[in-house]
Image: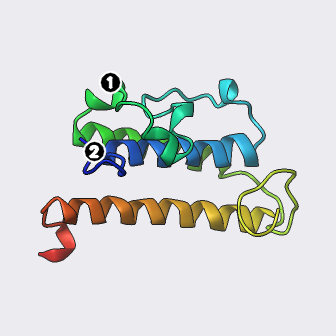
Amino acid sequence: MRPGPNAIAISEIISHIAYCEALAILGILLGRPKGEWGLESPLFDDRNWYPPQILTQPIRSALLTLSVPQLIAEWDRVHRFVLAAVRDYDVSSDTRLEKAWGIAPTVRSHLSYVGYHVAYHVGQIYLTRHVLGEATPEQA
């Protein structure tokens, strides 16, 4: 369910985070084309690259069929896979990248932006939960 006409659903935010984390690390940092990421996920969809674009179509059926525990488990699976893939990436944080997110085209800036991006969208999820009237764990 989308909480409003200009807001994406929590499942779509999770899909966006997972897809972008994989793209940023497997695609950009490690240079693997999407077909060579070594991971398939119902959370991956090129349409979830840019949130305003997500609003131009209905929620994908693959997301509607996943329960909240399944969404969380799948997001965790993607995250752990990405971490494992980059664990042995041994370059200086000042190494320049041909393509990068962030303020400078370096490994450090790119990874900092990826962390910021995840935190930003997790904040959106918590805000959406609050707006919908849910008491989240930190409110207990």
Instruction: Name which residue lies at 17% across and 58% down.
Output: 132
**Residue 112: image tag:** none
Q: Are marks 1 and 2 in contact (CB under 8 Å)?
A: no
Asked which secondary structure carries label 2, the reply is: loop
- Give the distance between the C-alpha atoms of the residues marked 1 and 2, in whole angstroms: 14 Å
Task: Name the residue tied to disc 2.
Answer: 2
The residue under the point 23% across, 42% down is 68
| Observer-nearest of 12 and 6 | 6
Point 11% across, 75% down: residue: 140
Regarding residue 120, the answer to whether it shows in the image is yes
Inspect the image, locate mark 1, and give the three-letter code of the amino acid beneath it.
Ser
**Kind of residue sitting beneath label 2:** Arg
Depth check: 91 or 29 in front?
29
Query: Farthest residue toward the bottom?
Result: 139
Q: Nearer the viewer, residue 7 or 118?
A: 7
Residue 80 in picture, x, y percent from top left = 49, 46
Residue 130 on image: x %, y %: 20, 66
| Res 61 label | 1
- Residue at 39% across, 61% down: 122
Element on which disc 1 rests: helix
